[in-house]
């Protein structure tokens, strides 16, 4: 490996170090060096969104970010969505609504949908469709994906209200 | 003995030494029919090579040559298709 | 063991309800392993060098410099894959497509490949391979390829199906003709005749997962291949043949598959990865880039189609003729033949004739794409039917109903239809609330129909009952869209146990008998049938074990609701034995309890659909947006309606993409100009509304549950449904798909200038 640089970063809450060439994408580094193959490569040019992750909370295509850019930052991948051994509401709703067929685009959709709901807990259909327009799905026609996100948003709002009332 | 039956050929199939669009044959299964036609017509083997399916009363059989052909069935030889 | 394949009407407990898929959690957590997600100790990175020319002689390949690069472990050219095909031209074509043999036949044709220790070294090595090309004249357009002056791509191709047999080679591989009646008589009876020429551009299946495999060949000729494929058994046979391996010694595992739609029924880089591994004596992982997927794999045919149809004033279609030219890429295919068989399949037309021309051009080898060849023919025919309907003054739906094919109608390819659902779908469309939804300014509504055969094929399934009563169902068809859940539901239905007690898995090629490619919408039809039969096998064992446990004659035992019940005098009062109780004792009653089935699942019922599409066309830009869309299709029997709806919606969306945007664009140099998702634009979430679906169930008489394939038909109607909607929105008839904004705008402008 020529020009390898040591990168210290946080991935899904855990401190992680890896060495990668300076021209290697974050996507490749996450897949091949950190072992997070839930990050999918569909195009390598930022057109399909299968490699979506968040970097310090912002949604990015990890194929368009260099591995070395993760230095000192927080990366979240699909592997980091479930907490305490439980699926994230979005993950469960994707299964319940049959919002995946082949499932290759699913990790990217989940990360993008979570990024949307984090900033807008009550999106309308159009907002959902535009927020997910950077993620390509070839199987579903998006119908069940949008339904799953709508249903997840509803549940998450309910849960939030409940926890607010409790506190 | 084997039943007499009439087999229709899809219009894309032509046998140089065949009598036309229908062939008479004695057979009770697809396999027997294919064997008989191969014996009888010199270029039938080449047709099989290209891919032939058998329609019996409108149901298409591509591979199951053990299939019995009922009496008075409508039998058609059509090109073997593939899918996506 | 013989089992009854015929449909029997019954009440279902599990089938027809909605269950979550067993692989769901793996797929939403990132754990599922697809083609590119496997690794092996010491693995190398494989990369392919591809032709930059549309057509060129390969004068010389010099790999010396690349071989010297540290970290390069093997380089292969066609010399490393000697021709072992023994006169099988189909196999020889696959071989030549894997690695060019003396000539590059299209932009993107694989020329050589390298395996190196890492990505960077492999990329550097590709640049060090020196290829001397001598450019040859090329042709990429189907009509041009048929002309006398076109460069002839293969001197071995003499047009089949014409008399007299041609004395000169050409790019026309075959002529096919289908139909019956006398079209001249039919046209003479017609009050109205419409004649039009249509064109459709080449599209790609566009699966989001690129082709990927991990190959490992040992010096003793044993080998493993992990690969994303629609049929690992067929891949095994093809790869073993091309590499001279024993079939049983090549173990192929199908990874989770990230979309196929026909494109992963064909072998592309796998023999090359195996050859690289054999030469390097190390595992080789080979993953295509998206540009390679577009340039080197999969596309469907581009076409040029003439349609002529005549009708009486009452709407009866008296004659129909289609002349269809389909290119198969650089190797001959049967694509126009399929078009001939499907073009008029929805209708009962007394006099019909379809002529197909299968043509070769300098483009990638065409692969099946969901109901291959049918959507283009349907675009031409269904557009023409709308024109006829308008001319005779009948609504498009009534026009179609007037001529619809029914049980007893002779199909254009010859035989008489059994029970089919096209009339049911049209009537459901007519009654659908979508038809009464108000249209706004610049909006229009279109309707179109579609047909696909569906196929069956060789299938093998195992069902093993564990001592705790849970069940492993082992399948050999690939799960491309949730079929594991449907198969587990079927097993649960037959055995009479809850769905969550059945676990369905896809076996590798060493663990189960041969299964044909998962194509032709056959997964649920074929493996469903084999699963029913395997379960019935297991039930007969369960009954025998129960009889033994009770000490009663076997024929006095029946199976009901997941338990054995003793009937007959003297032992009617024995308490029932559950599957679990019988399984628990199996070790002492004769060993493991299993069911097994191998079957040639023929008799797949035909699939018919009718679609309704509302579009809004922006007259300033020519951009068409889908406002509403409804799919009505006959599924025979929907095992898991969630995934049947998913197939309807997904197929419709692919058709919409084809109708509005997707196309291969070739430059004058014969090179593909848009090999990426930015410029080859598939529909995104914001392009679409919710897609409404209606599942009809006209049972297939040759499946125990009445199942028909559902995967493919839904891509057939959209091109015409969209085109008909655009015509009703703008008054402009589009005859060239995709009906992209520039094409629609040009057509609107032309109409305004003319008017």
Image (tube, grey):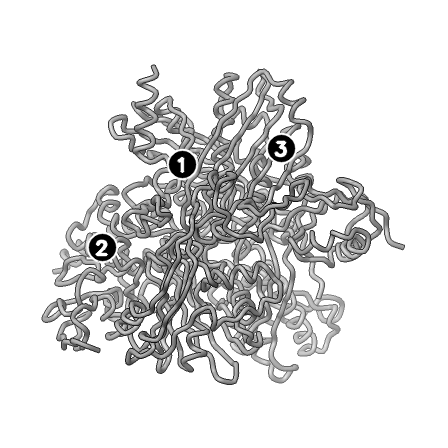
Extreme left residue here? Answer: A72
Q: Are marks 3 and 1 on the same chain?
A: yes
What is the C-alpha distance between the residues marked 3 and 1?
23 Å
Task: Give the quarter of the image for residue B63.
Answer: bottom right
With respect to residue C698, does C10 lie above or below? below
Q: Are marks 3 and 2 in contact (CB under 8 Å)?
A: no
Frontmost of labels 3 and 2 is 3
**Residue C206 disc label:** none
Q: Is residue C602 left or right of residue C568?
A: left
Frontmost of labels 2 and 1 is 1
Q: Chain of mark 1?
A: C
Q: Who's the residue at 57% across and 55% down the image?
A: C525
Mark 3 or mark 1: which comes first in sequence?
3
Q: Secondary structure at mark 3?
A: strand
Q: What residue is pinned by disc 1?
A: C737
Q: Residues within 10 Å of mark 1 (few under 14, many from 20)?
A: many
Q: Chain of mark 3?
A: C
Q: Who's the residue at 31% across and 18% down the image?
A: C753
Q: What residue is pinned by disc 2?
A: A156
Task: Give the quarter of the image for residue C540.
Answer: bottom right
Q: Chain of mark 2?
A: A
Q: Nearer the viewer, residue C168 or B28?
A: C168
With respect to residue C543, does A133 lie above or below? above
**Where is residue C596 shown, x and y percent of the image?**
62, 69
Is there any visible trace of residue C331 in the rendered image?
yes
Q: What residue is pinned by disc 3?
A: C353
Q: Secondary structure at mark 2?
A: helix
Q: Are marks 2 and 1 on the same chain?
A: no
């Amino acid at each position: 490996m020529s020009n390898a640089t040591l990168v210290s970063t946080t991935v899904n809450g855990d401190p992680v170090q890896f060495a990668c060439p300076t021209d290697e994408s974050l996507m490749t580094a996450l897949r091949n060096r950190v072992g997070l193959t839930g990050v999918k490569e569909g195009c390598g040019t930022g057109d399909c969104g299968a490699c979506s992750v968040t970097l310090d909370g912002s949604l990015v295509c990890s194929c368009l970010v260099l591995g070395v850019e993760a230095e000192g930052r927080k990366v979240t991948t699909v592997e980091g969505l479930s907490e305490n051994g439980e699926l994230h509401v979005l993950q469960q709703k994707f299964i319940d609504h049959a919002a995946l067929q082949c499932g290759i685009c699913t990790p990217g959709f989940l990360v993008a949908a979570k990024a949307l709901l984090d900033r807008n807990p009550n999106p309308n259909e159009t907002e959902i469709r535009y927020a997910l327009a950077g993620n390509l799905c070839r199987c579903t026609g998006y119908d069940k994906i949008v339904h799953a996100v709508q249903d997840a948003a509803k549940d998450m709002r309910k849960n939030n209200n409940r926890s607010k009332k409790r506190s | 003995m084997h039943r007499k039956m009439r087999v229709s050929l899809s219009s894309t199939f032509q046998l140089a030494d065949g009598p036309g669009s229908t062939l008479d044959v004695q057979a009770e299964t697809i396999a027997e029919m294919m064997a008989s036609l191969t014996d009888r017509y010199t270029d039938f083997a080449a047709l099989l090579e290209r891919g032939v399916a058998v329609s019996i009363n409108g149901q298409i059989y591509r591979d199951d040559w053990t299939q019995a052909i009922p009496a008075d069935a409508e039998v058609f030889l059509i090109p073997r298709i593939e899918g996506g | 063991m013989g089992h009854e394949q015929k449909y029997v009407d019954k009440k279902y407990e599990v089938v027809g309800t909605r269950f979550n898929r067993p692989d769901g959690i793996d797929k939403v957590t990132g754990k599922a392993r697809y083609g590119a997600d496997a690794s092996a100790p010491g693995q190398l990175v494989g990369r392919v060098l591809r032709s930059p020319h549309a057509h060129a002689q390969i004068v010389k390949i010099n790999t010396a410099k690349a071989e010297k690069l540290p970290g390069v472990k093997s380089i292969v050219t066609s010399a490393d894959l000697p021709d072992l095909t023994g006169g099988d031209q189909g196999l020889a074509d696959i071989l030549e497509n894997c690695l060019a043999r003396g000539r590059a036949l299209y932009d993107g044709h694989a020329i050589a490949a390298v395996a190196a220790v890492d990505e960077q070294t492999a990329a550097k090595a590709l640049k060090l391979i020196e290829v001397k090309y001598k450019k040859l004249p090329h042709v990429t357009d189907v009509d041009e390829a048929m002309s006398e002056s076109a460069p002839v791509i293969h001197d071995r191709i003499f047009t089949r199906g014409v008399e007299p047999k041609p004395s000169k080679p050409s790019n026309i591989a075959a002529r096919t003709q289908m139909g019956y009646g006398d079209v001249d008589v039919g046209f003479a009876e017609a009050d109205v005749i419409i004649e039009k020429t249509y064109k459709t551009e080449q599209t790609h299946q566009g699966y989001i997962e690129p082709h990927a495999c991990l190959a490992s060949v040992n010096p003793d000729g044993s080998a493993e291949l992990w690969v994303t494929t629609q049929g690992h058994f067929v891949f095994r046979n093809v790869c073993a043949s091309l590499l001279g391996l024993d079939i049983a010694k090549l173990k192929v595992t199908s990874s989770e598959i990230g979309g196929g739609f026909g494109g992963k029924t064909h072998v592309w880089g796998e023999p090359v990865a195996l050859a690289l591994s054999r030469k390097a004596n190390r595992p080789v992982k080979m993953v295509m880039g998206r540009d390679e997927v577009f340039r080197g794999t999969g596309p469907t045919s581009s076409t040029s189609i003439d349609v002529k149809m005549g009708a009486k004033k009452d709407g009866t279609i008296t004659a129909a003729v289609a002349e269809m030219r389909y290119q198969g890429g650089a190797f001959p295919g049967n694509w126009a033949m399929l078009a001939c068989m499907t073009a008029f399949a929805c209708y009962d037309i007394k006099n019909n004739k379809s002529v197909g021309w299968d043509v070769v051009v300098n483009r990638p080898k065409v692969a099946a794409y969901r109901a291959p060849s049918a959507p283009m023919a349907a675009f031409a025919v269904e557009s023409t039917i709308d024109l006829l309907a308008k001319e005779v003054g009948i609504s498009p739906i009534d026009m179609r109903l007037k001529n619809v094919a029914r049980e007893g109608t002779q199909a254009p390819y010859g035989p008489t239809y059994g029970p089919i659902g096209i009339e049911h779908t049209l009537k459901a469309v007519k009654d659908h609330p979508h038809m009464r939804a108000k249209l706004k300014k610049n909006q229009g509504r279109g309707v179109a129909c579609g047909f696909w055969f569906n196929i069956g094929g060789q299938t093998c399934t195992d069902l093993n009952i564990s001592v705790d009563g849970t069940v492993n169902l082992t399948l050999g068809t690939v799960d491309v869209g949730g079929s594991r859940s449907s198969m587990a539901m079927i097993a649960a239905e037959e055995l009479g146990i809850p769905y969550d007690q059945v676990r369905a898995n896809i076996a590798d090629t060493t663990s189960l008998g041969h299964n044909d490619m998962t194509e032709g919408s056959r997964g649920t039809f074929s493996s469903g049938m084999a699963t029913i039969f395997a379960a019935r096998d297991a039930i007969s064992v369960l009954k025998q074990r129960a009889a033994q446990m009770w000490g009663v004659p076997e024929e006095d035992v029946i199976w009901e609701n997941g338990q054995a019940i003793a009937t007959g005098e003297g032992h009617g009062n024995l308490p029932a034995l559950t599957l679990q109780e019988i399984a628990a004792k199996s070790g002492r009653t004769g060993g493991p309890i299993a069911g097994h089935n191998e079957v040639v699942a023929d008799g797949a019922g035909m699939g018919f659909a009718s679609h309704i599409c509302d579009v809004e066309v922006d007259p300033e830009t020519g951009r068409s947006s889908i406002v509403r869309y409804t799919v009505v299709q006959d599924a025979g029997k929907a095992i898991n309606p969630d995934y049947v709806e998913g197939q309807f919606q997904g197929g419709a969306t692919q058709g919409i993409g084809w109708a509005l945007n997707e196309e291969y664009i070739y430059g004058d140099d014969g090179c593909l100009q848009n090999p990426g998702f930015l410029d080859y634009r598939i529909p995104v979430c914001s392009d679409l509304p919710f897609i409404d679906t209606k599942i009809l169930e006209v049972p297939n008489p040759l499946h125990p549950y009445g199942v028909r394939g559902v995967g493919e038909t839904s891509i057939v109607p959209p091109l015409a449904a969209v085109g008909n909607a655009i015509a009703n929105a703008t008054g402009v008839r589009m005859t060239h798909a995709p009906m992209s904004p520039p094409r629609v705008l040009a057509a609107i402008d032309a109409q305004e200038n003319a008017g």
